[in-house]
Amino acid sequence: MRLPGSKIWRAFPELDRFSDEQCERFVLRAKQEHGWGKVWTLAGAVLLLAIAVPVLVVLMEAAWSLAERWVLRSAPGVYDAVMSTAGRAALAFAIVLACLLVLLLARDLWLRRTVSRRIRRTACAGCGYPMLGLTPDRGVVTCPECNRAFFLDDAGLSEEDLAL
C-alpha cells in the first residue's frame, strides 16, 4: 500500500529510470484508459461498506453494552455524561474513518492494477522486458534484452503507448 499523496509509480521498478513528469503522464494515460475499472472497484468498495458498516455497528453496540455494564458497576454517576454522548460520537467517528479507509484502499488497488496492466501490455513476448521508453522504428522495437522484434501492431499498441 502506498501513502496517500505519494508517487504511485515509485512502487513499480520498471518506472524507476524515468522522471516524475514522464511517470505522471504514463499514470494519467493508464487512468484514462481504464476509467471504468475505477467505477467497478469503487462500486465493490461501496458494496463492502454496505455490508461491513451494519456489522461494525452491531459489534460496537455489543462492546458498548459490555462497557456500559462495567461503568454502571464502577461509577454510576459517570454513565450519563460519558457513555451516552461521547461514546456515540466515538462510534460515529470510527465508522466514518473506516469508510474513508476502505475507499482509499479501493482507489489504491485500482490504481496499482491499472498501472501494472499497462506495464505488462508493453512487455516483450520473449523475455518479459518492459519496452517502455524505447523508440519504435516503423512500428517495430527491438528488445534490448533478447534482441527479439516487438511489432506494435501485433500487440495492439501505438508509439504513444511506449512513450513516457
Image (spheres, helix red, strand yellow):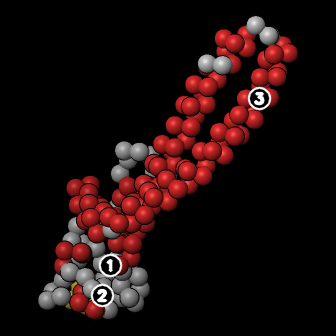
Residue at (73% x, 29% y) in the render: 64
| Quadrant in which residue 23 is drawn | bottom left
- Mark 1 neighbour density, 10 Å: few (under 14) some (14–19) many (20 or more): many
Q: As rendered, which of 21 and 49 lies closer to the eye?
A: 49
25 vs 73, left or right, is left
- Mark 2 neighbour density, 10 Å: few (under 14) some (14–19) many (20 or more): few
Question: Do the residues bearing badges 2 and 3 touch, measured as CB atoms within 8 Å?
Answer: no
Question: Do the residues bearing badges 2 and 1 touch, measured as CB atoms within 8 Å?
Answer: yes
In this view, the mark in front (2 or 1): 2
CA gap, disc 2 to disc 1? 8 Å
125 vs 71, left or right, is left
Residue at (51% x, 43% y) in the render: 99
> Circle 1 is placed at which residue position?
122
The percent coordinates of residue 30 (x first, y second) are 30, 66
> Circle 2 is placed at which residue position?
155
CA gap, disc 3 to disc 1? 56 Å
The percent coordinates of residue 4 (x first, y second) are 41, 45
Q: As rendered, which of 93 and 7 lies closer to the eye?
A: 93
Q: Secondary structure at mark 2?
A: helix
Count of marks, rendered view: 3
Task: Assign the C terminus to one quadrant of the image.
Answer: bottom left
Q: Amino acid at mark 2?
A: Ala
> Circle 3 is placed at which residue position?
65
The percent coordinates of residue 144 (x first, y second) are 31, 83
Of the numbered discs 3 and 1, the one sitting upstream in the chain is 3
The percent coordinates of residue 156 (x first, y second) are 27, 86
- Mark 3 neighbour density, 10 Å: few (under 14) some (14–19) many (20 or more): few
Q: Secondary structure at mark 1?
A: loop
Residue at (57% x, 25% y) in the render: 89
Q: As rendered, which of 108 and 48 lies closer to the eye?
A: 48
